[in-house]
Image: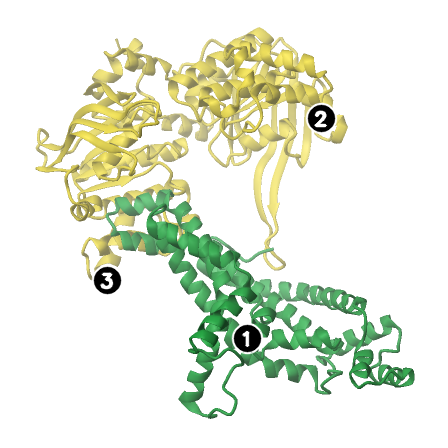
């Protein structure tokens, strides 16, 4: 089957891509000043050279760089991401522990931005230049141009500090009940602001994409045919215009989906969301090489997987496209 | 039902205003004509004559920028211009339906063919899915599509242009409309496909006693199917009458000019070229396009040229004739070396140019030049015309001054005048742009001109002018030409000899007069038979 063959070929490619990513990330990280041993020693208040050297030996940091790289690649090939130097826990455990929180946040933001974005774009295109169009365009532009952390801070200020409606920090109320519906509601209340903050940017992107694409499709011949068939407007918009207009949106959505698992460093940090983004951020501050490399690797794999999925989705939506080279 | 006098549709004094900034005030002005039961009325005109606007007005589908300002379009006792949107929607598709010019774009690319027809039945109230399916099958059969059940689930991209147009016709006929409006439905089709589709429309029309309003620019098509003809120019009807009357005894000046511009099918007396030296020769030219489809499946191969051989003598025009996909354009591109051939020789004055590369090509470029089909896409919109023309000589090392002077001279030669050089391409009409394209090709004083469908994008009257210009130039400059065309009428007029191509091979090759009078290959005969209006010889002969 063509699709299986396509996936197989892309996976073979992916191995090389991932290898390249590991090497580049590995070297980039080592370019940053300081290493985990120095930082741990510094935090422990010890400046004893011997202690640091001992730590380095313990983490294998005293060996030549290319040997370390080689060892790392070899470990990864055996699906071993190593230990976090700081937390003394396997890196894979840390990542999987944080993943649900990140997926919840990014997934909700993804669905929100895609759904609302396409809806707004379609509405705006119905009467280009009308008041609804102007309003949506301005809204999209504002969402597009607003820095994400600033928006997050303003939301916190408004809804948490002034109005006191929503919690500003974390994923669940500490000490809250652990069970059932109450817990879900609690998480949902915590989720609202970060998801909105994260989704608004992409929502703006989708709204603009959809609008432009709809306007283009509206002028095409088959829409004229649909009108000449005597179809009602809503049917023309939905079955003929929107279906064709949504194609470019899909490629962008695939791009966004690839970044879902990488988390959102800024939003997770602003809202104290315990996801992978913050894990990576903390690991960076502590020069926790293995953990950071693990997060990067994991993210890269997800991007590749979602790219393949996007290509396949494309062939499902558009029969003209064959998965090929 | 066969009451021929009963008026089905009556357009009375219709005027549609153009937006304020347009070059004329009205898209159509005071036009009136009727369409009767069981009649095919051809509305003929060149681009901008208002024929499509008329059709859109009848459907109630005018773009928002065009407003009907006076007149009536009576369908039964209802005025289409006054009906509510919902009433119009009922009429569209159910009572009046329409097919369009571009079968490639007129169907939704993401929807199965059967669903596109079925959707129409559904929204006009045919509730049961089973009944819709049955009706779709019946329709696909009626338009003679092969394997209707498979067609139902096919997507438009899997169909050829002719098949798509049949689907459009099936869709238009789905609800047995009283009127079919066909807006240039065969213009984008190959000549043999066109003949089939015209035959189909005519047969279905007769069977259902429909009134057909057939919009076209092609008098050959008119001669083929029209009962009555309305000729339009600049938004007015200049002549209306029975087809035989208008075709053979046109009264209005404009109609006479239009008909005179239709190239005749009798080739001019062949010139004695045989004694002149060959300037270009192709020997066993071959080009196959291959695309890889993956590890396990075979490569897709398209044979664009196979064992193609021909000779062009000094001063001769060789016509390369064929339908789309015949490989004629590929051969032309190999000759100017825009495409690399796989094997074979291309001899220009005895030298093989097929294998030349890089700088070695430069002298050859001077000798062989090309005129392209689309006068809109083939000129750089951001450069002034004189610069476009001078670009070739500049690349060949001609000093700037001299190249520019030559450019202005050429503009005079092609009848545009020197002032044209300081303007941009978008300021010119299609015919004028094609003149610029010719001037550009001539700038290098080529000995061989490859003209790829140079007039197919132009209106008939403009086409005649450009053909005259080419003829004049070839005499004046002793040019040889490889003239690529799908239009046998044009070929008959322009070419000294003709090579008929089919699926990458030349199936017949000989002097034009001989090919037309006594075609040897079955495919040539089929092509000649398919020429619309072949029986019509124009007013001169009929008089």
Q: Nearer the viewer, residue B152 or A273?
A: A273
Judging from the image, mark 2 belongs to the subunit labelled B
Q: Is residue A43 left or right of residue B241?
A: right
Q: Which residue is mark 1?
A: A271
Q: Chain of mark 1?
A: A
Residue appearing at x 61%, y 82% in the figure: A96
Contact flag, marks 3 and 2 (Cβ < 8 Å): no
State the CA–CA distance, disc 3 to disc 1. 56 Å
Q: Nearer the viewer, residue A13 or A154?
A: A154
Q: Mark 2: which secondary structure?
A: loop
Image height of A308 relative to B486, above or below: below
Q: x and y percent of residue A124 in the render?
A: 37, 52
The residue at the point 77 percent across, 65 percent down is A28
Residue count near mark 2 (Cα–Cα under 10 Å), binned few <14, some 14–19, many ≥20: some
| A135 lies left or right of A161 | left
Q: Position of residue B324 (x, y in %)?
A: 47, 35
Which residue corresponds to mark 3? Answer: B130
Q: Which residue is mark 2?
A: B353
In the rendered image, residues at marks 2 and 1 fall on the same chain: no
Q: Residue at x 66, y 15 (%)?
A: B403
Q: Is residue B55 left or right of residue A131?
A: left
The residue mark sitting in front, 3 or 1, is: 1
- Distance CA(mark 3)–CA(mark 2): 63 Å
Task: Give me the chain that's yellow.
Answer: B
């Amino acid at each position: 089957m063509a699709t299986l063959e396509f996936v197989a070929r892309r996976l073979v490619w992916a191995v090389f891509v991932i290898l390249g990513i590991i090497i580049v990330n590995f070297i980039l990280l080592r370019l940053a000043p300081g290493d985990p041993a120095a930082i741990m020693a510094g935090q422990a208040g010890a400046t004893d050279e011997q202690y640091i050297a001992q730590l380095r030996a313990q983490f294998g940091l005293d060996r030549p760089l290319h040997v370390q790289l080689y060892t790392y690649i070899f470990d990864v090939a055996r699906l071993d991401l190593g230990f976090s130097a700081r937390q003394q826990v396997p890196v894979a455990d840390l990542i999987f522990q944080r993943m649900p929180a990140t997926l919840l946040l990014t997934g909700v933001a993804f669905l929100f931005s895609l759904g609302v974005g396409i809806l707004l774009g379609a509405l705006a295109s119905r009467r280009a230049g009308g008041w609804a169009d102007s309003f949506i365009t301005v809204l999209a532009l504002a969402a597009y141009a607003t820095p994400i952390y600033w928006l997050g801070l303003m939301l916190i200020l408004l809804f948490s500090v002034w109005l006191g409606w929503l919690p500003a920090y974390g994923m669940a109320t500490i000490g809250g009940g652990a069970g059932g519906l109450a817990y879900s509601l609690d998480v949902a209340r915590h989720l609202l602001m970060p998801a909105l903050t994260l989704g608004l940017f992409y929502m703006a992107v989708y709204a603009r994409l959809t609008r432009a694409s709809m306007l283009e499709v509206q002028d095409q011949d088959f829409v004229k045919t649909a009108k000449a068939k005597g179809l009602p407007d809503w049917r023309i918009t939905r079955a003929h215009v929107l279906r064709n207009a949504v194609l470019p949106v899909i490629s962008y959505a695939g791009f966004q989906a690839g970044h879902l698992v990488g988390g959102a460093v800024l939003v997770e940090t602003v809202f104290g969301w315990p996801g992978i983004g913050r894990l990576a951020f903390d690991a960076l501050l502590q020069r926790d090489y293995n953990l950071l490399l693990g997060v990067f690797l994991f993210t890269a794999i997800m991007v590749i997987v979602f790219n393949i999925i996007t290509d396949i989705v494309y062939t499902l939506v558009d029969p003209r496209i064959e998965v090929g080279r | 039902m066969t009451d021929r006098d009963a008026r089905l549709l009556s357009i009375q004094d219709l005027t549609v205003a153009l937006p304020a900034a347009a070059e004329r005030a009205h898209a159509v002005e005071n036009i009136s004509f009727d369409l009767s039961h069981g009649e095919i009325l051809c509305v003929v005109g060149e681009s901008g004559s208002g024929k499509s606007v008329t059709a859109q007005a009848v459907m109630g589908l005018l773009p928002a920028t065009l407003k009907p300002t006076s007149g009536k379009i009576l369908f039964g006792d209802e005025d289409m211009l006054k009906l509510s949107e919902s009433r119009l929607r009922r009429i569209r598709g159910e009572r009046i339906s329409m097919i369009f010019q571009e079968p490639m774009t007129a169907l939704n690319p993401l929807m199965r063919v059967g669903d596109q027809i079925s959707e129409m039945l559904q929204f006009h109230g045919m509730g049961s899915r089973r009944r819709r399916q049955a009706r779709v099958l019946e329709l696909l059969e009626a338009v003679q599509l092969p394997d209707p059940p498979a067609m139902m689930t096919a997507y438009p991209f899997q169909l050829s242009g002719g098949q798509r147009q049949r689907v459009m016709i099936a869709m238009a006929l789905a609800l047995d409309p009283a009127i079919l409006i066909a807006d240039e439905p065969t213009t984008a089709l190959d000549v043999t496909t066109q003949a089939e589709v015209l035959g189909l429309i005519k047969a279905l029309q007769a069977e259902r006693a429909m009134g057909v309003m057939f919009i076209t620019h092609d008098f050959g098509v008119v001669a083929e199917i029209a009962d009555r003809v309305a000729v339009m120019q600049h938004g007015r009807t200049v002549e209306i009458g029975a087809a035989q009357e208008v075709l053979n005894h046109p009264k209005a000046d404009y109609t006479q000019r239009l008909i005179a511009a239709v190239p005749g099918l009798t080739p001019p007396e062949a010139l004695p070229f045989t004694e002149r030296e060959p300037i270009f020769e192709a020997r066993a030219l071959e080009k196959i396009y291959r695309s890889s489809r993956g590890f396990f499946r075979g490569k897709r191969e398209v044979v664009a040229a196979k064992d193609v051989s021909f000779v062009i003598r000094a001063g001769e025009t060789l016509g390369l004739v064929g339908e789309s996909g015949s490989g004629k354009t590929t051969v032309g591109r190999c000759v100017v070396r825009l495409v690399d051939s796989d094997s074979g020789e291309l001899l220009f004055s005895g030298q093989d140019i097929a294998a030349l590369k890089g700088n070695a090509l430069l002298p050859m470029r001077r000798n062989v030049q090309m005129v392209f089909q689309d006068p809109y896409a083939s000129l750089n919109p951001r450069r002034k015309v004189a610069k476009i023309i001078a670009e070739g000589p500049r690349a060949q090392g001609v000093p700037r001054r001299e190249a520019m002077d030559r450019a202005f001279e050429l503009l005079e030669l092609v009848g545009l005048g020197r002032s044209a050089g300081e303007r941009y391409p978008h300021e010119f009409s299609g015919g004028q742009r094609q003149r610029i394209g010719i001037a550009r090709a001539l700038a290098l004083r080529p000995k061989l001109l490859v003209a790829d469908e140079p007039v197919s994008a132009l209106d008939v009257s403009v086409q005649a002018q450009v053909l005259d210009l080419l003829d004049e130039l070839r005499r004046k400059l002793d040019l040889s030409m490889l003239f690529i065309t799908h239009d046998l009428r044009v070929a008959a007029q322009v070419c000294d000899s003709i090579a008929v191509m089919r699926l990458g091979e030349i199936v017949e090759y000989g002097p034009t007069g001989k090919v037309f009078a006594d075609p040897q290959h079955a495919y040539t005969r089929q092509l000649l038979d398919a020429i619309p209006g072949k029986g019509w010889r124009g007013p001169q002969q009929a008089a």
